[in-house]
Amino acid sequence: MNQLPRILPTAAADETFGGVTYHIGGELVPVLSIDVSNQPVYFEHHILLWKNSTIRIGVKAIKGAVKRMLAGMQVFVTEASGSGIIAFSRDGAGQVVPIHLRVGEELHVREHQFLAATSNVEYTFERVRGISNMLFGQTGFFIDKFRGTSREGVLWLHGYGNVFEKELAAGETIDVEPGGWLYKDPHVQMDTVVDRLSSGLFAAGFNFTVNRFTGPGRVGIQSMYVNNATGDR
């Protein structure tokens, strides 16, 4: 029997990894609180909720800044360091997902869903072109890539609605609505599959499109999707 995707925990208390201790709490709009006394974190703009006044805020450049700027993506992220706690919250109902990255581990993430990461996590990106352009615009879309470098670190993502995870065996596949996937392991292959609806008078000429993921590896699925390219952020 196929295993259903499992829902990920919605809360965390006194979780320690990668040089930080963090907490996740709240119901509809969760709050992520991180003690950055021993390890700085960088985060997306406009998500700061509160911080201790002893924490300093700076700017961190992202690799490939020119390409990202031309595509309308963020070029800089904000970095927090110093003694104390900083808290983040995104203006949207959803779930904060912590990903523990050990040395050499990597995760591929849907654009606009990055929340924060410890400073020892490397942040790069890849532009995906091809048939997916029909869904994401003429320039395609970006996949953000996060990798544990010489030290383990933590990556926090924001998924809309609730977040489920499916562990795919080698060769196992799952079809996900194009707005439904949140992250995947690097070894998981993602393809766009278009089926033409040819039966029925009113369905003729329409297409049904999914992203097909092939294992081995994890796929994160969010139960709600907000299109940041068209939505009012």
Image (cartoon, grey):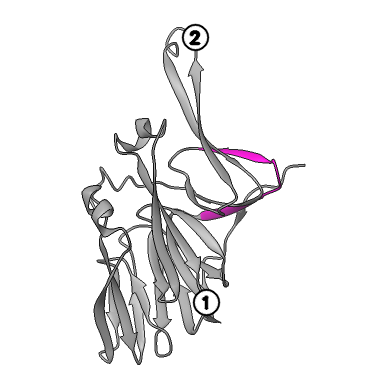
Residue range (magenta) = 163-176
Q: Considering the whole magenta stretch, tell me its main secondary structure.
A: strand
When asked about the image quadrant of residue 28, the answer is bottom left
Q: Earlier in the sequence, mark 2 or mark 1?
A: 1
List x then y, in percent, for residue 225. Answer: 40, 46
Residue 174 numbered mark, or none: none
Give the residue at x 47% y 80%: 22
In front of the other: 92 or 204: 204
Please give left or right for residue 216 compared with residue 198 in the image. Answer: right
Which residue bears the numbered disc 1?
A: 150
Q: Residues within 10 Å of mark 2 (few under 14, many from 20)?
A: few
Quarter of the rendering occupied by the N terminus: top right
Give the residue at x 45% y 71%: 121
Q: CA distance from mark 2 to mark 1?
A: 57 Å
Give the residue at x 29% y 83%: 51
Give the residue at x 60% y 50%: 187
Amino acid type of the residue tagged 2 in the rendering:
Gly
Please give left or right for residue 152 compared with residue 6 in the image. Answer: left
Amino acid type of the residue tagged 1 in the rendering:
Ser
The residue tagged with tag 1: helix, strand or loop?
loop
List x then y, in percent, for residue 181. Answer: 49, 47
Please give left or right for residue 208 compared with residue 227 in the image. Answer: right
Which residue bears the numbered disc 2?
A: 200
